[in-house]
Amino acid sequence: MQLTNRKKVVSNKEQSFAERIYFPAIIKGMAITFSHLFKKRPTIMYPEQQREYAPIYRGQHVLKRDDNGAERCTSCGMCAVACPAEAITMESAERKKGEEHLYREEKYAAKYEINMLRCIFCGLCEDACPKEAIFLTDKIVDAHFERDEFIFGKDKLVEKMEQRVDVSKRQTPEVLAFKKIPGLKHNELFTEKLEKGKKH
Amino acid sequence: MAVFLFYKSLLCLAVFAVSLGIAAYSTWWERKFAGLLQDRWGPSRAGWWGLLQPLADGGKMLFKEEIIPNVSNKFLFVLAPGLFIVTAIMAGVLIPWAPDLVINGVSYPMQVADINVGVIFLLGVTSIGVYGIMIGGWSSNNKYSLLGAIRASAQMISYELAMGISLIALIIACGGTLSFREIVGMQDAGVANIVLQPLGFIIFFVCAMAETNRAPFDLAECETELVGGYHTEYSAFKLGLFLFAEYINMFVSSAVMAGFYFGGYNFPFSAELYHMMGLEPGSWMISMIGFIAYFTKTCIFISVFMWIRWTIPRFRYDQLMNLGWKTLLPLSLFNLLLTVVIEFFRGNLHF
């Protein structure tokens, strides 16, 4: 009884003379390997030559400052909520008088830590951030010997004003446009406030 | 006498140095060629095109820790690599590298020893070579080593038969001389022995590949089955000597093939070329050109060995034995018969 039509008759035919003496097959194989002598090689000579990173490569995080040098992060915790690996922890603090040049808004992150061993570099934190404060950069996280050395605090994450991190490739016009739709207009609101403050 | 001793020892030293140098650079070329065949670049860091790689490898081998297993037979364990490399280099004394050099009417052959039973000496020395593998594998007291050694010796014995018989056919075709020098010298008329012995050459080539334990016949040390084969327990420079000896074997058998079947230092229209350049027989220029021709042929054979290694997968052990006993041996006997019949009708054979 035939149940399916998938039955195959295996061909077990005798090898021909040419197949049995192997030489044609060997010569053919050697011709194939020889032709590879002249093929283009995909090798990248690493230290001299480097593969170009994708513009949206997701490496180590940076906490951005604004153009006046104030930290943008307001410790809202959206990134920590969004993080699927639960790598981000933070402690908030209130801005004191006279610290306006350090922190952009009334609340700031006194402690901000990312565990780089937990982080899966998915980039959901930068998607979640309403303040354009956290970005992933093309810097590869350094190797360390101890586990606790992988918990990066603000000392490593916050960008320094003398060496600002360029994230313009990640802030595509589309992303910026998205973040500027009504209700998310924190940038304009802030500049308005700043200008008001300057007038007073 | 003093001149003779000086020239012989100089020649010995040259053969020794060339053998070792070729072995070292064979390791480099093996890796480079394998890389090029596989769309890679191969060694490229140590020196231009990785040309200092053999030095780096040799340095590494020298400075690594030398381990002699407690359970091994220490005397034989130390003896084996030395034996292997000595026999490998010994076969090199037969090779007539270039046409004779004539200085002040005295002829200096570019060959360390012209033994009148050279072919038999060659077969004998290559057979002794297997003792290095056998002793090394056995004295390691390791199952893998022993298996590799047993395989190597069985393989050597099986393929030596077909090799010897194909050589007998060659000797008959060459008029019965056993001297390497004369066999090479006979080919200066422009006809290389490959024309007379095409089947014999193929048999000899396959057997030479098996004798030198090269892929696809590298069952003595196949990594997938036997870890490292007979040199599993060896480390540091003893391992280096084993690997070196294998490359020297390859070099010598390439030179033998080039000499026996491809005319050695002769090449087509060599006499016309020398005549055109106005060179007297025995001048150093002829020796130089002849040496370059022989050396080029040898290097091409070494490359072909490598080319085959990186193309064809390894035989299964029963396939290896089948090929040796059921195919090559009858084939070489048939070749012998054919040669005898042809030479008889050409009138070169006298009973």
Image (spheres, rainbow, N blue to C red):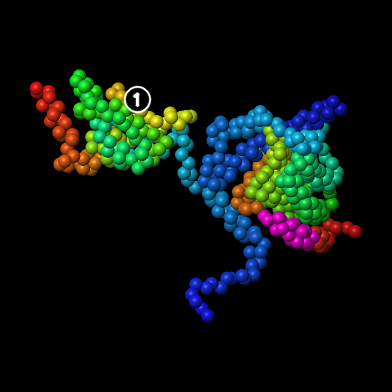
Above or below for A16 versus A37? below
Relative to the observer, which residue lies in front, A34 or B88? B88
Q: Position of residue B191 (x, y in %)?
A: 72, 51
Q: Secondary structure at mark 1?
A: helix
* Residue indicated by mark 1: A155
Q: Picture quarter containing residue B197?
A: bottom right
Q: Return the residue nearer the eye: B63 or B232.
A: B232
Q: In the image, what residue type sits under mark 1? A: Asp
Total numbered circles: 1
Which chain contains the residue that carries disc 1?
Answer: A
Which picture quadrant has residue A175?
A: top left
Magenta-tinted stretch = B315-334
In the image, is residue B55 part of the stretch drawn in magenta? no
Residue B33 visible in image: yes
In the picture as drawn, the residue positioned furthest to the bottom comes out as A1
For image coordinates 71% across by 55% down, the residue present is B317
Q: State the residue at coordinates (34%, 35%).
A: A88
Q: Quadrant of the N terminus of chain B?
A: top right
Q: Residues within 10 Å of mark 1 (few under 14, many from 20)?
A: few
Residue A165 spot, x, y in % from top left = 31, 30
Q: Main secondary structure of the magenta part?
A: helix
Q: Quadrant of the C terminus of chain B?
A: bottom right
Q: Position of residue B152 (x, y in %)?
A: 75, 48
Query: Which residue sits furthest right?
Result: B351
